[in-house]
Each structure stands twice: as C-alpha cells, then as structure tokens.
Image (cartoon, rainbow, N blue to C red):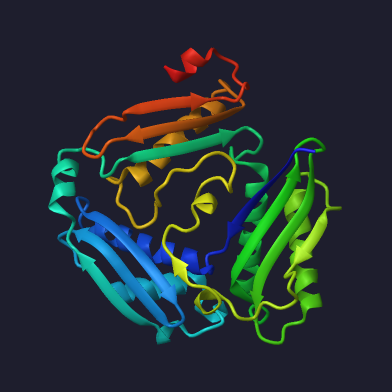
Amino acid sequence: MNIITCEQVSSGHPDKICDQIADAVVTDCLRHDPASRVAIEVLIKDYHIVVAGELTSTHEPDYRALVDSAFESIGKNSLGYDPDKFELEVLVSRQSPDIAAGVDTVGAGDQGMMFGWASNETIELLPLPFVLAGKLLDKLEEYRKTKPGLLCADAKAQVSFDYDSGKIKTFLCSTQTKPGASLAAVKKIVGKLMKEVALEYALNTDFQILVNPTGKFETGGPFADSGVTGRKLACDTYGGVGHIGGGAMSGKDPAKADRSGTCISRRIARDIVAAGYADKCEIQIAYAIGAAEPVSIHAETFGTEHQDVSFIEA
C-alpha cells in the first residue's frame, strides 16, 4: 500500500491565530506604505499576546485593532473564550541597518532555500489528502458560523489516502466543542461533512472515521496550547508532501525570500504541471542575503515529465 497522510489546521488553531495576526500587520503596513519592511512574529498563551519583531515603515500599526480584527474574522462567538480579555505586549523595533543595506538595493532579505510543489492529481494542483483535509475544515468553519452552539474554532483534520487503491483509508478530525456537547452529536455532524467532502471528489465513503478520539475536546485555542507564528509550515504549504523551506512565511513582507521565494517556486511548479510538461513537479530556489538573483534553481519531476528535463529546467 502507498498511503500518504496530510494534515491541515483551522483558523482557530493557536498557531494559525498567530499567523493571522502577523499577516494582518504586514497587510496594514503595506497598504499604507508599500515600501514597508516587516518581520513580525506573534506568541499567544492563555489571555496573553506578544507581538515582536522588526518594522520599518512610515505607518504605525494599531496593533490592538489588528488583533481584534483577526478574532472577528475567525468568529468571536465560537472561540470558546472572550477575545476582549487579552493583554497585548508589543516588542517591535526597526529593521537592522545591516539587513536593510542589502534589501534596499533590491536584494533578498535573507539567505535560505524555498520549495514549490504541484501535481495534477487535483484541480488545485495540490496533494489530494491535503485538499480533502482543508475542505473539511472549510465546511466545519461554515457550520460553526451558521449554526452556533456546538462547535468552537480550534480544529485539526488529517486524511490518510491510499494511492494504490485510490481510496481514503482514514479521515480524522479533532474539533473543539462547547462544554457539555454530545460526542455522538459531534461525530454525526463531522462524519456527515467528511462524506460530503469525499463525494465532491468522487471518492469512497467507507473510510475509517475518527472524531475527537480522546472523547472530549472542550478546552482549546491558547488555553490548551501555546501558539507561535510559523509553526505550521507543512499546513501552509503541501501538508507534509514534498520538501519545505526552513523559514516561515507569515509576518514577512515580499522582500523576505522565505515568503516571495516560496510563492514564486510554487508558481513555477504549478505552471510546469498546468502546461502538461510533467504530472508532478517540485522546485527548489536558494538565495543569498542581499543578492537579487537566486544562487541556484532545481527542478524535480519524479520521472513524470513529458518533456526533456533540460527543457523544463530552462
């Protein structure tokens, strides 16, 4: 059996809360000052949020408003806690002049390697189990926002798919619930949504269903686990399929190669697959800090190419 497992997390997961706050700072700064240089990280635990990093911009963000907006987007009524109670600490300084010297001359904001991946197995050109896990979480988010009272925002989904048989083997979801929620009711709702996702992709529905395997998931978000920016890199990319770079994308402006390099490598891999040059492609790009051009570019097609690899690499 050739079983591949992928995971995705919801917008209410503590790590993703941090990613959303960090990205809200980036968006706000770039909206007011496109030349902003932003490298922001966020930590959340219990009712404490720390925003830290470096920022050089003509715009001064309203950090409290951005935090409130992030929670509003996630869904304040289904968090399972009161977002208005958070204490906010901001530890932000200007960008290092040593880094600025390289970046301001249109060079990469850091050294490192970034990866992009694509496959024709789904219309999204993403790994099938990764897409399925994400689709379930989309349905869960819609359910908790339109039918409040049972589910909360913190959730994780995981799909194990057998590529030899073309079948889903296991569909797993752990989702936070309101106190006293019936596990049987939660299993019924989530199981139904799992099967809806499978049918949308013309897949089997006789898979193993696992919902809240510990039996109860009432304490969630930053009260069950701390959250930190950039700790869900696999979920931000391809669910664990293929390689990932060493740096987070959230909280960084496009001058940071971790973000822009990952995006452009995904675009290249996607274009190669969409053009029919290969069924599967992974691109690696590496940068040196301050350098405008990559130090290396590598294409891997895993033997699925329909054109000479030399043509694809060119």
Instruction: State the quadrant of the C terminus.
Output: top left
Please say if 148 is above or below 255.
Answer: below
> In the image, 163: left or right of 245?
right
Q: Residue at x 28, y 57 (%)?
A: 39
**Horizontal and vertical percent position of residue 58:** 15, 60
Residue 20 occupies which quadrant of the picture?
Answer: bottom left
- Residue 22 seen anywhere in this rendered image of the structure: yes
Please say if 53 is above or below 275.
Answer: below
Numbered circles on residues, count: 0
Please say if 245 is above or below 302.
Answer: below
**Horizontal and vertical percent position of residue 144:** 63, 73
- Residue 24 seen anywhere in this rendered image of the structure: no
Instruction: State the quadrant of the N terminus.
Output: top right
Q: Residue at x 32, y 53 (%)?
A: 252
**Horizontal and vertical percent position of residue 174:** 68, 67
Q: Residue at x 39, y 72 (%)?
A: 69
Residue 273 occupies which quadrant of the picture?
Answer: top right
Please say if 305 is above or below 227.
Answer: above
Toward the viewer: 33 or 212? Answer: 212
**Horizontal and vertical percent position of residue 105:** 15, 38
> In the image, 100: left or right of 110?
left
Toward the viewer: 235 or 80? Answer: 235
> In the image, 131: left or right of 284?
right
Toward the viewer: 199 or 252? Answer: 252
